[in-house]
Amino acid sequence: MQKFKLYQIHLTDAEHDKVNAEGHNSVPKHLTKLDMSFAKNEVGSLAKKAMDNNWYTHVSNITADGLEKVFEIGNIGPEENIERLAPMFSVSVSDVVEDESGKQFVCASIGWQEVA
């Protein structure tokens, strides 16, 4: 078992209001998150861009036996394996997981891709 850091992109209330008023293209971090939902091979580079722009928040630490278990625990528990640091959604596409060595992976529509 190791402790994985979970990072998620969260919009502020003002950013939500801007998206609702002006559309998806009006908030770059929202658009990048959407792009990751539809991308195939470039999800890792989109996540790197979002990381470089500080659009991710470290929301929790999850104790698990690997990335697939991080996904499972982040969606169905057990809760005792989750150390919540900030509001957290269930683990899904565009979320970044960092292992104890500092290597980062982004949840893609199918599987995981290295953040690069």
Image (cartoon, helix red, strand yellow):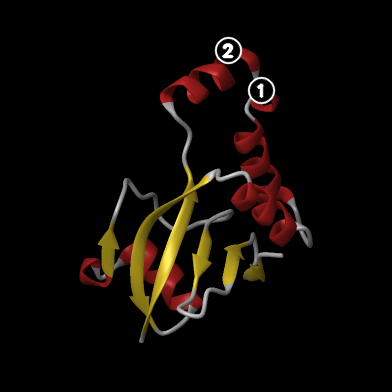
- Residue placed under numbered mark 1 in the picture: 26
Is 71 placed above or below 43 here?
below
Which residue shows up at 64% across the image and 15% down it? Answer: 22
57 vs 107, nearest the viewer? 57
Q: Secondary structure at mark 1?
A: helix
Indicate the quadrant where residue 5 lies: bottom left
Which residue shows up at 48% across the image and 51% down it? Answer: 8
Q: Mark 2 or mark 1: which is in front? A: 1
Q: Amino acid at mark 2?
A: Ala
- Residue placed under numbered mark 2 in the picture: 21
Asked if the residue at tag 1 contacts the one at tag 2, i.e. Cβ–Cβ closer than 8 Å, the answer is: yes
- Point out residue 61 in the picture as x, y percentages from the top left corner: 35, 66
- Point out residue 25 in the picture as x, y percentages from the top left corner: 70, 26
Q: Amino acid at mark 1?
A: Ser
Indicate the quadrant where residue 96 lies: bottom right
In which quadrant will I find the C terminus?
bottom right
Q: Is residue 32 left or right of residue 41?
A: left
